[in-house]
Image: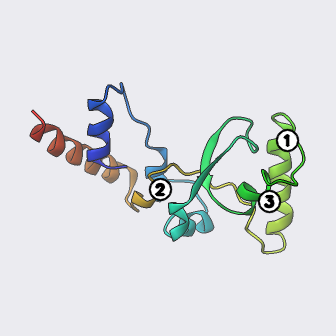
Amino acid sequence: MNGKGIAAALQLGAAAVQLGTAFILSPESGANARYRAAMQSERTHSTQISAAISGRPARGLANRLMTEIRGPSAPDIPDYPMAYDAAEALYAAASSRSNHDFAVQWAGQGAPLARALPAGDLVTTLMREYHAVASTDR
């Protein structure tokens, strides 16, 4: 989520880094206003992993969907795409009643470091930060 993190990952042997969460607040992102607000809140400090929505483990902002879908009284989760379709239907029904507790809001562990910059400016900033750190490590 910043140049220091990129440098650390590469120094530890990573071939690349994935920074999708870094771009959620970019104006080019398709994130809706509620997702953007959540990404600028304290919720970014409590992400969770769940495979219940897409069938594959993925990290997102904790909300009722993330917590109740894997609670002790939750039924077994059907395979993809049924689980995904059910989550979409649940969100549609809840949001039609102004309840947004069931939105899927994917976000990585670096979510608190997200910056609201245009994508091009963010890439430039990340590279500038990376080069500043990488040049001092030599």
* Residue at the (37%, 49%) spot, across then down: 1
Residue 44 in percent (x, y) is at 52, 62
Give the percent coordinates (x, y) of residue 115: 39, 60
Q: Badge 2: how crowded within 10 Å, few (<14), some, or many (20+)?
A: many
Residue type at mark 3 is Tyr
Three-letter code, disc 1: Ile
Give whichever of 85, 51 is nearer the camera: 51
**Residue on which the image places disc 3:** 91
When the figure is inspected, residue 72 is found, relative to residue 5, above or below; the finding is below
32 horizontally vs 87: left or right: left
| Neighbours of disc 1 within 10 Å: few (<14), some (14-19), many (20+) | some
Residue extending furthest front?
72
Disc nearer the start of the sequence (3/1)? 1
Q: Which residue is mark 2?
A: 111
C-alpha span from label 2 to label 1:
27 Å
SS state under label 3: helix
Q: Are marks 3 and 1 in contact (CB under 8 Å)?
A: no
* Cβ atoms under marks 3 and 2 closer than 8 Å: no
